[in-house]
Amino acid sequence: MKNFVTLFLITASAVLYAQKTDYNTDKKGFVAQGYDVVSYFTNSEPVEGKKKYQTTYDEATFVFSSEKNLALFKENPTKYIPQYGGYCAYAIAAKKTKMNIDAESYEIRDGKLYLFYSSWFSNKLDDWKNGNTENLQVQGDKNWEELKHQNN
C-alpha cells in the first residue's frame, strides 16, 4: 500500500507539473510538435527539431534543427515563440478554445508565428485567411489572456 501511495503521488506531481505550462506541447513535451520554431522564419518550410538542440523557456521545452537556430532563439526567444502558446490561432480567436495544431499549417503575420489545426477536411488557416484576420488577431489576443492559464 505504501508503494501504491508513493507511486500515486509521483504520478500526480508529474501530471500537475506537465500542465503547469501555458504552451501546447506534444507527448514528448515539446512546443510546436517538436518543430524548430526558428525554422519557420529562416527556411522555406518548417523543420523538425532534434533533441540534442533544445532549451527551456518560460517552463516550456523547444527543440531546434541546428545549433545556429538554438542560438538565435536564445538571443531573442519572444521573436520566435508561436502566438497563443502554440495552440490553433483560429480556435483561440473564433471559438475561444484551445485546439491542437498541425505544425505544418502556419502563417507568419506581422513578424509573429501563428499555428493552425488541419485535417483532411478542414484547415483552420484557410478560415483565418478568409475571415477578417485583423479582427481575429485582436479577438485572439483578448481570448488568450483568459485561456492561457487554463488546463486543456
Image (cartoon, rainbow, N blue to C red):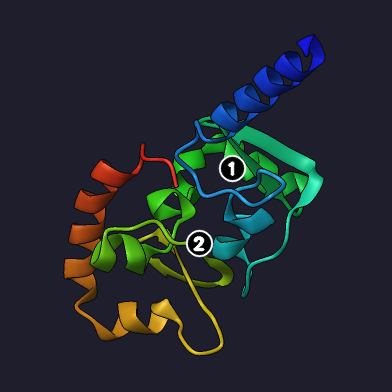
Q: In which quarter of the image is the N terminus?
A: top right
Comes first in the chain, label 1 or label 2: 1
Residue 83 drawn at (x, y percent) = 40, 53
Residue indicated by mark 2: 100
The residue located at (34%, 66%) in the rendering is 91
Q: In which quarter of the image is residue 41?
A: bottom right
Residue indicated by mark 1: 73
The residue located at (64%, 57%) in the rendering is 33
Residue type, numbered disc 1: Phe
Q: Which of 102 and 71 is in front in this view?
A: 102
Residue 103 drawn at (x, y percent) = 58, 66
The residue located at (27%, 59%) in the rendering is 96
State left or right for residue 3 relative to residue 100.
right
Q: Which of 98 and 45 is in front in this view?
A: 98
Q: Kindly report which numbered mark, 1 or 2, lies closer to the viewer in this rendering.
A: 2
Q: In the displayed structure, would residue 7 be above or below residue 118?
A: above
Residue type, numbered disc 2: Asn
Circle 2 residues within 10 Å: few <14, some 14–19, many ≥20: many
As helix, strand or loop, the secondary structure at mark 2 comes to: loop
Number of numbered markers: 2
Residue 114 drawn at (x, y percent) = 42, 63
The residue located at (75%, 21%) in the rendering is 7
Q: In the displayed structure, would residue 14 be above or below residue 102?
A: above
Q: In the displayed structure, would residue 123 be above or below residue 81?
A: below
State left or right for residue 113 relative to residue 11.
left
Circle 1 residues within 10 Å: few <14, some 14–19, many ≥20: many
> Marks 1 and 2, Cα distance to the nearest angstrom?
23 Å
